[in-house]
Amino acid sequence: ASSSAADASATSATAEGAEEESDNARAARLGKQLAECVPCAEAARRLPCPRTAARRPRDGAPVVIDGALDQAACAEACAAALAFFDGAGDRRIAEQQLHRGDDVAFVPLFGEDEGSPLRQALGPARRLLARAAADIGDADLLVPEVAQLALYDGCKRNLKPGYVAHRDNASTPGAAGENYREVTLLLYLNGAPPGASGGELRSYVGAEPSDLDGATALRVDDIQPRAGRLVLFESRTLLHAVRPVGLWRRVALSLWCLKRIPNDRLSPLTDILGADAFQYLDAISLARLAACARVFGKKKDGRSLCDAAARQQLSALREEFLTGVKSIDGMDWLLYRQIPSWIYCLYDWEESSAALGRWGPVDMFGDRGWTFRRKEKEREKRKRAVDEIRHQIHIKGSRAQE
């Protein structure tokens, strides 16, 4: 997963150890970032754990492994997760509330756990998932740097949260919504107490790729949540849902094994211009090219070539300048999240540098200093720029549909 684009959401982890819904977390949630993932074997090496019974799902049916994590570890992790969500407020995903009702947090898979009670409590679960990913035995699979912690709270709100039938990836290559998810790993941290209902993973085994509601399924299996139960299934194949949860709080930790898909269609352009040519484009030009790549093709290794170029430029700038290279402080760019995050950062640096050049040093109360434009003017200019880019996206999308 990549770094965030905005100061308001750039923090890699909260004090409790769960990542904010930044560009970084959103990319992980959508399964659309590979650039900083690691091979499964490397993930298992960094998070040592005994071998598991995990295996590659076949024939569209899920693999269910009971007792993958011991009850004590599940209880500790579940308690820490509930404490976190109780203090975090509403963490439902705004643009997805029509079809899912869970609260979501993203927890870094690797790194130190000190100072983070949530990450410490989730340590055994994180190690188990990393080991299970390696035990699948596919050398081409990659593990992202964050895992998703989800709470379906059937007690807190006057509704029964669930998740409508869906797949974790497009069923056919090149279809809308395609991402890099190959295998889904789901670890339950608790089960329904007596008198509670729902939370089952409803699996529509054998449903045709075009089937979105399970009408063509060969069979329908309801997998009960149980503490320590690990479920693996093919992300592209299995149509599944979460049954509405009533009178209990279902907690689970998910990890997606990712796999590369064909390069984006900017690759021929790179062959003609040379990869170094991208280093001479400004942020607006990179954003326009990135918009074309998004409309007409897919990204390369999870990060568009334009985003990678912006990141490389910023890396060089960080070596030259100690300050000034940072993400933008406004939210206008993030509203529709259309442009990769490193391009945001580069644009912000270019604008800050331009402001310094225009205004120059002035005398302030007898001292030399710098005068900057007011934030309102900065936001207005950024909004005009992003509106222009969004207009280009709309034009390219309309032409692609034609």
Image (spheres, rainbow, N blue to C red):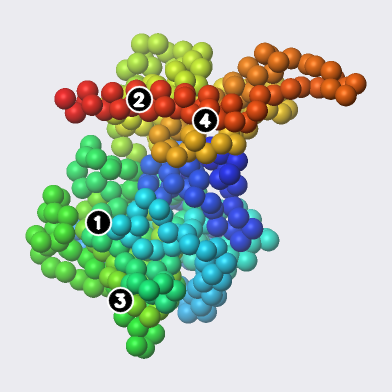
Q: Tell me the residue that label 3 is attached to.
A: 198
Q: Amino acid at mark 3?
A: Gly
Residues tagged 4 and 1 counted as in contact (Cβ below 8 A): no
Q: Tell me the residue that label 4 is attached to.
A: 344
Determine if residue 140 is in view.
Answer: no
The earlier-in-sequence mark between 1 and 2 is 1
Query: Distance of mark 4 from mark 1, alpha carbons?
Result: 32 Å
Query: Distance of mark 2 from mark 4, alpha carbons?
Result: 17 Å
The earlier-in-sequence mark between 4 and 1 is 1
Q: Tell me the residue that label 1 is attached to.
A: 166
The earlier-in-sequence mark between 1 and 3 is 1
Task: Give the farthest residue toward the bottom.
Answer: 194
Q: How many dots with numbers?
A: 4
Tell me if 393 is positioned left or right of 322 in this view.
left
In depth, the one of 85 and 335 nearer the eye is: 335
Instruction: Identify the mark at residue 396; answer none if there is no mark.
Output: none
Q: Secondary structure at mark 4?
A: helix
Q: Secondary structure at mark 2?
A: helix
Determine if residue 275 is in view.
Answer: yes
Tell me if 23 is positioned left or right of 121 in this view.
left
In depth, the one of 167 and 43 nearer the eye is: 167
Of badges 2 and 4, the one in the foreground is 2
In depth, the one of 181 and 323 nearer the eye is: 323
The earlier-in-sequence mark between 3 and 2 is 3
Q: Secondary structure at mark 1?
A: strand
Residue at 23% in and 26% down: 398
Position above or below: 247 against 290: below
Residue at 21% in and 53% down: 237
Residues tagged 3 and 4 counted as in contact (Cβ below 8 A): no
Tag 3: Cα neighbours inside 10 Å, few (<14), some, or many (≥20)? many
